[in-house]
Structures are given as C-alpha cells and as structure tokens.
Image (spheres, helix red, strand yellow):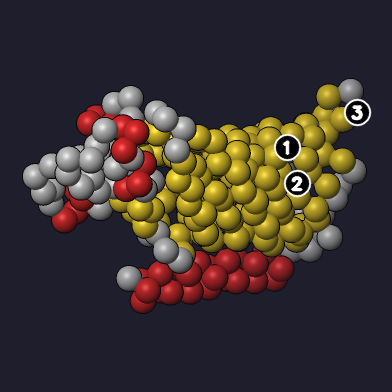
Amino acid sequence: QRILNYYCMKKSFLCLIAFLSMAISTQAGDVIQLGVMGGYNLTAVNFKRGSLDNTLIGKNGSGWYLGPKVQFNAFRGFGLNAALVYNQCRYTLENTVGEQSSKTTHSFNIPLNLKYSFEVRGTGVHFTTGPNFAFNVGNRSWNFSNLLSSKKLGNTSYEVNGVFKNKVINTTWNIGAGINIFSSLDLGIVYNFAIGKVGKSALNQTGVNAGDLVLPSYKTNTFSLQASYYF
C-alpha cells in the first residue's frame, strides 16, 4: 500500500512539473500566471445510516490547504487553472450520548478548473468549475469502536467493531465563485462535493462476524474560503 501511495504521489508531481514546463515554454506575460493558492476548509461527513440508524452523527470538520498554482488566461474571459496543494482536515463523529471520535486526514490534491471572468461595475468577478483529484497519504483507517461499544448505549453484550477506511484516490467536483482584486489576487468560496464514495467500512472488505455491526460507506462535502496570489 505504501508503494502504491508513493507511486501516485510521484506521478502527480511529475504531471504538475510537466504542466508547469509547458506553461512557461509556451507563452509569457499576462496569458500565463504562476502563483500560490491556500484556504480554509469546512467539511461535513455524510453516510447512509443502515444498521447505524440513530447511532452516529457526522460533525463538521475543518482544515487548511496550500500549494503552487498556474493559470492560463485564454480569450474573452475564459481560462484554465491547476494546482498541487497539501490538504489537511480533521473529522469528528459523535454518538447519541455525546461521545466523540476524531480523525485527521492528509492528502495531496490536484484541482483542475475552467474559469470564466468578467466585470460588474468595475469589479472583477469569476466562476470556476472542474474536477479535484485527492491522493490520500498516511494512515487511512479510522477506528471509532469506542463510540459503538459505549456502556451508555447498552452495547456491552458483545464486541462492536467500527473502522472506516479512506480510498487511496478520491475524485470530487469543484464549483466556485469569487472576485478579482487587481490582477494578482483572487478571493472566493468553493463548494466541493464527492462524485463517488470517499471511504468504506473495513468490515465490508474482510467479512462480518456474528454480532458485528455493518458500517455504511460515506461521502464528504466541503465548503472552502480560498485565496490565490499570482506573482
């Protein structure tokens, strides 16, 4: 698994380097802009209840991201941008008696967006949309058995297992809007939603023993405040 993670990260870095090289060698000036992008995330965990009905609640998670960015300004306000950012987010689950379990995830994300810019009474406005590819690194498993085995829930007659496991690569979609300040700073808000499942129960992979709860797959939806500065 570590070899696969390393391979994915290496491939992503090589793709971005090739992307930047083509950008620099093709044209210069205002057509191509290099910069840095960063922001603050607010993420919600959503999953089908299944056998966990009225047992677990997904709380909002928060985090941040930062990395290099390149933008192509094409014609009539249309353009393309891409970035490679390190993303960190902390998620929390809570059971019905208020006990919580948290998990911090780490990933390298590659957002690729189509951008349309125009002016409204002298103020630059832009809209963006496109896919985001997240390569998860580090420990991808989240064990929250303590929430399911709580004595307060009455689950003490048998051992209750609870493990979620993130996929190595997740594909999501971005929709954003913002304003342009001069030609060097973009400020905006982005909504990112999962196209597929972000993670699934480890029990679904290994088989379910008698007395174990079957955990559902889950998705994450994210709002982020984003800033991009171009050199």
What kind of element bears circle 3?
Answer: loop
Image position, residue 161 (x, y; %):
25, 48
What kind of element bears circle 2?
Answer: strand
Q: Residue at x 54, y 36 (%)?
A: 60
Of residues 212 and 202, the one drawn nearer to the viewer in this rendering: 212
Pointer 2 with pointer 1, Cβ within 8 A: yes
Query: Which quadrant is the N terminus positioned in?
Result: bottom left
Q: Residue at x 33, y 25 (%)?
A: 54
**What's under tag 1, amino acid-wise?**
Gly
Of residues 81 and 228, the one drawn nearer to the viewer in this rendering: 228
Checking the image for residue 216, the label placed there is none
Of residues 169 and 200, the one drawn nearer to the viewer in this rendering: 200
Which is closer to the viewer, label 3 or label 1? 1
Mark-to-mark CA distance, 2 and 1: 7 Å
The answer to whether 78 is drawn above or below residue 141 in the figure is above
Checking the image for residue 188, the label placed there is 1
Residue that numbered label 3 is attached to = 122
| Left or right: 178, with 152 as reference point | right
What kind of element bears circle 1?
Answer: strand
Which is closer to the viewer, label 2 or label 3? 2
Residue that numbered label 2 is attached to = 227
Pointer 2 with pointer 3, Cβ within 8 A: no
| Left or right: 101, with 87 as reference point | left
Image position, residue 111 (x, y; %):
56, 51
